[in-house]
Each structure stands twice: as C-alpha cells, then as structure tokens.
Image: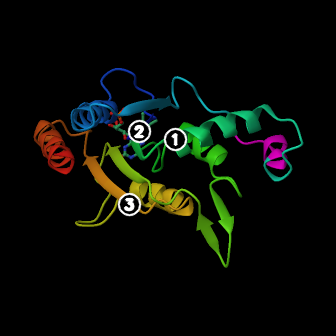
Amino acid sequence: MNTLLRIDSSLRLEDSYSRRMGDYFVNQWIMKHPDGAIIQRDTTIYPTPHLTQQTYDAFLDESLHSEGLLLSDELIDELYRSSEILITCPMYNYGIPSSLKAYFDLVIRTRKTFMYDHGIKGLLSGKKAHIISVTGGIHSAPGGMNPLEIHLTSILNHMGIRNIRYFPLEGTAAPDQLSEKMNVIETSIFKYLN
Ligand SMILES: Cc1cc2nc3c(=O)[nH]c(=O)nc-3n(C[C@H](O)[C@H](O)[C@H](O)COP(=O)(O)O)c2cc1C
C-alpha cells in the first residue's frame, strides 16, 4: 500500500502558503492513491524536543533510558512505514524552521536511518520525497535550488532518499503575482501526480 508521510512546519496554522500547497498536494495524491494511507506530523502543533546528550547517548547505547529514544523510535518507524514523504517548509531566518531541524535531529540516527560502510550509507533508499519550500523573498538563482532545498536534500540523501521532487514558492512577501505563482506550483503538482 502507498503511504504518504506529510510533515508540516509552518508556525502559521491559518493563512500558511506551505500548508495550503501541502493540502493541494495531499488532495491530488489521494485521488491518485484512493487506497493510500496518510500519516501526519506537525512540528508546530507537536514540537519535537531538541536532541540532548541523554538522548544522543541512548542512540549509541540503547540500554540507556531516554524519552527521546522512544520518540525517535516512533518517528523512525513512521518513516519506514511510508513509501513517500511530503515536507512543507517555510524559510525562517535563512533556514528551515528550528522545529523541523529538531525533528530531523531525532530521525538521523546511526544503524537506524544510516550507517557507515566505506562512507555514509542511507538506509531509507527506495522512498520518494517531495519538498514544498516557501520563502518571503527570492533566494534561488534561476534554475538552481534555494537554501531550504539544498539543506533538506542533504538531510534526505544522508538517509538514502535520492528521489526528490521540488515545488518552490518564492516571494510570498510580494502579493503581486503570488496567485499566479501558486497556480504554477499547483499545475506542476497536478502534472506530476497525474
Ligand atoms: C520568523 C520569520 C522569519 C522569516 N525569515 C525569512 C527569511 O529569512 N527569508 C525569507 O525570504 N522569508 C522569511 N520569512 C518569510 C516566510 O518565509 C514567508 O512568510 C513564508 O510565506 C512563510 O511560510 P507560510 O506561508 O507557510 O507560513 C520569515 C518569516 C518569519 C515568520
């Protein structure tokens, strides 16, 4: 069965462009996969705690007790149960939201999502990822990736995920042309999923 893990990270629960684009993606995805399952993670509504030394020590020695280890296990289990991952990601202060970084700090874990084998070998290969990145200004060079896409690509590649599609919406601070830009993104999501 196809399972889509949707991860939202905008601090705005209303009027968020990344969440709106994510809703559009999921609606189209459900039409393509009527029997598919959706798992939802929201790093704003349910913030992941920051990685601590206690949790990191437990990553290396699982006999050590840590609440963070249990949560990490749960989040990694969700990743393994998913065939596809949708990340909706606004830009905050030139980077991904700290809540989303905290999520990834708990799932990037040796022997679970990557291992060392003549270098880093990701253990989640075969999964697809979709990144909807939203920025107030314009950050990507023509034809190039924006900083959010570059960062998320490194993280996903580290876990072995290389099949990634990008849907960037840049310039939400300037209302003119915004609805046109959103139409372009929605059209490209529609074509991609149909
Ligand atoms: C705390 C904060 C920091 C931001 N920093 C940046 C930034 O560094 N660069 C940028 O282009 N936009 C920045 N923005 C604008 C957001 O990226 C923009 O409003 C985007 O639409 C937010 O996503 P959302 O609509 O899904 O909430 C920032 C917004 C907030 C709230």
Please name the residue that numbered disc 3 is placed on.
163
Name the side, left or right, on which 117 lies relative to 96: right
Residue 150 higher or lower than 7, as above or below = below
- Distance CA(mark 1)–CA(mark 2): 7 Å
Residue appearing at x 52%, y 41% in the figure: 81
Look at the picture and state if 26 lies above or below 147: above
Which segment is the magenta one?
50-58
- Mark 2 Cα shell of 10 Å, populated few (<14), some (14-19), many (≥20): some
- For the residue carrying disc 3, how many other residues have a C-alpha within 10 Å: few (<14), some (14-19), or many (20+)? some
Residue in front for this viewpoint, 146 or 129:
129
The residue lying at 33 percent from left, 36 percent from top is 18
Mark found first going from the N terminus, 1 or 2? 2
Element carrying mark 2: strand
Labels 3 and 1: the sequence-earlier one: 1
Residue 64 occupies quadrant: top right
Q: For the residues marked 3 and 1, what is the alpha-carbon distance in whole angstroms?
A: 17 Å
Residue that numbered label 1 is attached to: 81
Q: Is residue 139 magenta?
A: no
Give the quadrant of the N terminus: top left
- Residue 96 is situated, as x and y percent measured from the top left of the image, at 48, 46
Residue 52 covered by magenta stretch: yes
Q: Which residue is mark 2?
A: 3
